[in-house]
Image: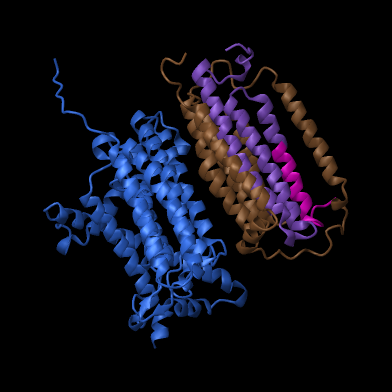
Chain colours: A brown, B purple, C blue
Amino acid sequence: MSIVFFAIAGLSVAGALAAVTLKSTVHCALALTVAFAGLALLFLELDAQFAGFAQILVYVGAVAILVVFAILLTRGSETPKDGVYSTKWLLGLVTASGIFAVLAWAVLHSTWALPGAGGAPKAAPQVTVMDIGNALMGRYVLPLEIVALLLTSALIGAVIVAMHEKEGAQ
Amino acid sequence: MTPATNPLIGYLLVAALLFAIGLAGALTRRNAILVLIGIELMLNAANLNFIAFWRYGPHPELLTGMMFAIFSIAVAAAEAAVGLGLVIAIHRHTHTTDLDQMNRMKG
Amino acid sequence: MIEKADQIFVILAHWLVSFLPVGLQPAALVLLAVVAIIVTFPALFAISVLLERKGLGRMQNRYGPNRVGPYGIFQPVADGIKSLTKEDIVPTSADGVVHFLAPVLLVVVVFMGYAVLPMGRNMTLVNLDAGLLFFFAVGASTELSVFMAGWSSRNKYSLLGAMRAVAQMISYEVPLLLSSLAIVMITGSLSLGKIVEAQNHYTWGLPHWYIFTPWGFAGFLLYAVATTAESNRSPFDLPEGESELVAGYFTEYSGFKFALFFLGEYVGMLSISGLGTTLFLGGWSAPLQILGWVPSWCWFFGKVMLSMCVFIWVRGTLPRLRQDQLMNFAWKFVLPLSLINLMVAATWRFLGEGWERWVVCSAILLLAYTLMGRAGMRQGQIGPRSYRYAE
């Protein structure tokens, strides 16, 4: 486990923690962006170049901006009068900790955790963008078309849902 | 159980931690947008799992993990757009994004 | 001799690095290249700022700055000293951390884009397989810094300017990506080095640059429009228009931080012109085969500075577009045309060699442009002029 992995993982986890605990919603959105960037760096560390750059392009370049716009359009940057945490926050925290405990137990007691289960350190798979393109047009052409349809319907749906209602339609 | 023998374990633990943090955020915050932020964190943690297993698992030349992660990124972006559109529409109607106050079905 | 002049920077770098032990050499080479980029492009920024002020001045029938040095050539130095010594005022209600990080983020992200540009033969910093994707990914992060600057100032004008700027930048990002996608489709690779290599061939002494094909020419025009909007330059500079919004999202910045924003904007313009020359104008390849003796990096930087001159020329000539006009333009004209351009590029590929493909592709593009231009102009019928006086 290299120092680079710990540094990037620490950055991601710190960003995620800040994103769920800070009081100001815009600060939460910016911390989320840091978490996304940390995750993109982890993808690059795992030699998944295309996934890493796609993560930055889609998440940092689009989803983060979308979240920020939604916060501004719903007056989320004003301080709420009842506090930022829900009344049932303890239950949520306990549930999340329980799930983390179960997942960590499963990971540490699985066959992957046995010494020698990884075998020799694997060489990085040489994946070019051409391989991804061939896979997308060959084996994964059906998911590709379905995702295209999904994105189109999501685009139209989001516009219709968030559009101003016409005057007099009440 | 030292992760030094298999770097996959480190990545899986980080993904589990991010998932739990996202879940905690989705369950404890009042603002609807912060719940969506928690959901995005959970999706990202799952993506990290996919890519880690692609890299350290058998048959990385099949690109299964990477493909799954790419499609997951696309679907998550679509879901974020629709979810935030819904939050904006609800805010326009009830002038609040506080989830604790949205406990009535009648508009 | 010609190869030596062409590769002079590469040879120099290898010679400098050979003094170090072998283990450190790759890292030292990368570090040297990074230092070279950080030195060269701000120098080009200084030259372009001077060029802009003098050029705009001449276009507006006045001299530009001509006091500092002969013909004003030391004006950038004076500007730099002024920005460094001005007081850095931060409003008390501003969000300190975010206010500080916004220009830093912009400059970091903008310089990262230079890592994949091929500035000459064998002169790319990192030859990534997905180089174009990397460039667009880091370009998409500049919008975040614009928003951070506008929001952290706690100023209604800054926030309004920031929201307008971000809306404009995300609208024009899609045509930017689509017009580059036609190039990727024809070349078959996302690597910028391969795209330049594909354009480095000559027929009858003329080069195979993509701008000389119908879809390449249309793509270049769409790319030029999209980059002008992405850099918030006139005629798309409503977010920073001085007459509308004071200074838009950097109203509350003074001194060195303002200089960083300015630097970031111009260096971003240089980098996106660099990408435009790589994709459409053949990168470092010479225009005519007989001119191949001129070093490749000369051609690259010459083309980039030519693009900057065109940016300045357009700024001095065209009036500013209103926000709704520029959004309409993006979604209803530029985006459909870039989709049609993509399909025309596919048609070009599949019609095979010959004169038919030139005629068919040019005809489709001209037809699309005329029809959509006519349809666009029919909206907004101007009624009879009415005068309203304050009663």
Picture coordinates of residue A167 (x, y %)? Answer: 41, 17
Q: Is residue C95 left or right of residue A109?
A: left
Specify whether residue C251 is in view: no
- Depth check, front residue: C351 or C66: C351
Above/below status of A73 relative to C167: above
Question: Residue placed at 53% from the left, 79% from the top?
Answer: C19
- Does the segment drawn in magenta span residue B16? yes
| SS assignment for the magenta stretch, majority | helix
- State the residue at coordinates (17%, 58%): C68
Is C224 on the left-hand or right-hand side of C102? Answer: left
Residue B12 can be seen in this image: yes
C215 left or right of A65?
left
- Nearest the camera: B42 or C102? B42
Magenta span contains residue A90:
no
Q: Position of residue C208 (x, y in %)?
A: 41, 73
C228 versus A128 height, above or below: above
Nearer-the-camera pick, B99 or B74:
B74
Q: Position of residue C389 (x, y in %)?
A: 13, 20
Residue at (33% x, 81% y) in the render: C291
- Name the outermost residue toward the bottom: C1
Q: Nearer the viewer, residue C187 or C7?
A: C187
Q: Residue at x 38, y 48 (%)?
A: C334
What span is colored magenta in the figure? B1-19
Image-quadrant location for residue B13 = top right
